[in-house]
Amino acid sequence: MSPRQTNPKDPVSGLPQKGIPEATVARLPVYLRALHGLKDRGVATVSSEELASAAGVNSAKLRKDLSHLGSYGTRGVGYEVEYLVYQISRELGLTQDWVVAIIGVGNLGRALAGYGGFASRGFRVAGLLDADSSIVGQHISGLTVEHTDQLETIIKDHGVSIAVIATPAAAAQPLCDRVVAAGVTSVLNFAPVVLNVPEGVDVRKVDLSIELQILAFHEQRKAGGPVGELPNGYIEVHQ
Amino acid sequence: MSPRQTNPKDPVSGLPQKGIPEATVARLPVYLRALHGLKDRGVATVSSEELASAAGVNSAKLRKDLSHLGSYGTRGVGYEVEYLVYQISRELGLTQDWVVAIIGVGNLGRALAGYGGFASRGFRVAGLLDADSSIVGQHISGLTVEHTDQLETIIKDHGVSIAVIATPAAAAQPLCDRVVAAGVTSVLNFAPVVLNVPEGVDVRKVDLSIELQILAFHEQRKAGGPVGELPNGYIEVHQ
């Protein structure tokens, strides 16, 4: 989902420094969610097979991913749930608090402001900003919406380290430029546009239609396979 | 992002039938988005390196993924953008229209109802449903919100094949059960709960905090590495 990754890479292996592959990093939050579910149910230890099944991956991949964290489990016992929660949280940086500003307080911005999954993972929304003066001043999820004119002040005063952009497409790049100029180096982009950022800034783009497309693939399989007309000028060649 | 995958697997390879690995399926929408961007800019052919860079993967992985579709490009030329858009769209099932119902019309449901990325990928929202009578009857993105009492009727009358659940946690499972009983076999779940479904039904769960967690990982790396206190009873062992 990330068109740009500017984190430092090891020049020999091509892996991120400290040797955790990007694909592993992307699966750690999924393992963490499964582990929180187990912890909530009072489960103390979990086998790699059980955890892999809960996370929707195969157990060999799970064991390899966790070995990058120096976590190998105990033969015949598995992994200690609480310690593994700690290890993954620490690796992901969730044992510290991150201050987030949400820019764009339309339906999506409001949904994100009230999203319980942020607070429970260490993300604290400290600012809601919008350019629409009819929205500025509204109270949403315990915060007062402020005008985007105040963007730089809010970033500085609250120590914002991650900006969430949930504006229409046209507004996103100028706001992203201001966020980056104010020193923020992580941007989560919900706007339907590719954002350009300088070296050293990480942008991740969320495309809410991607999961629907994966469902469509499986739905089509259940219905008997692909159908569709070729574009003009092409003929089908069976391979 | 999918804790449950019930699509049929090949008993020998463990791959989905017709041999496209699940991880490849998950990357196809990302390639498609990059290709649409190239097509919009009038680009006719693209090298595997350029496309891989736009999609944020390495080019060897891209070529392997596309080989599953029988697409190998032309040496020294690359891939024809328009034909590859067609091939991936066809594989994903996007050359046909999918009828979607959104259940739960809070901030997130409203944001999804107005999300341009659905329509442009072949997903047609045919129904918006909510249990709150103060929301029923509202006009949102060209549709009138209907009561969840009408769920089965709307699924049948519109031929809904994918249900999007954007309700609070407690409402999600009973509504999911009704959707499945009405014959829907694909569910996209935004509610913060794991849904149980029978064999043959695909559920994908969207966790909006996952991308934030990946950003936190990189932000922490930029700041110099993990920090955090061990849970009670554990001591740090360096490996």
Image: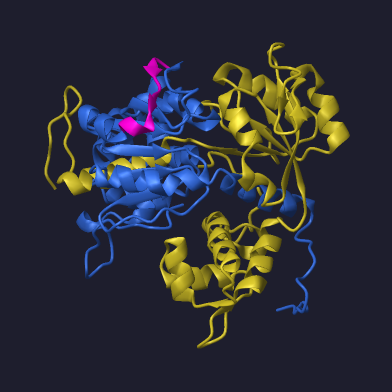
Chain colours: A yellow, B blue
> Between A223 and B142, which is closer to the camera in this rendering?
B142
Residue at 21% x, 33% y: name it.
Answer: B156
Regarding residue B74, the answer to whether it shows in the image is no
- Considering only vertical position in the picture, is A33 above or below B236? above
> Which residue appears farthest toward the top when viewing the image?
A133
**Quarter of image, res B148:** top left
> Between A28 and B51, which is closer to the camera in this rendering?
A28
- Considering only vertical position in the picture, is A169 above or below A121? above
* Magenta region includes residue B145: yes
Q: Position of residue A155 (x, y in %)?
A: 81, 32
Q: Position of residue B215 (x, y in %)?
A: 65, 46
Q: Position of residue B53 (x, y in %)?
A: 49, 41
The answer to whether A80 appears left or right of A48 in the picture is: right
- Considering only vertical position in the picture, is A136 above or below B117? above
The answer to whether B49 appears left or right of A224 in the picture is: right
- Considering only vertical position in the picture, is B185 above or below A87? above
Identify the magenta region. B141-150
**Quarter of image, res A58:** bottom left
Q: Position of residue A46 (x, y in %)?
A: 53, 76
> Between B164 and B156, which is closer to the camera in this rendering?
B156
How many numbered dots are placed on residues in this image? 0
> Which residue appears farthest toward the right when viewing the image?
A157
Regarding residue B110, the answer to whether it shows in the image is yes
Residue at 67% x, 73% y: name it.
Answer: A83
* Magenta region includes residue B125: no
**Quarter of image, res A22:** bottom right
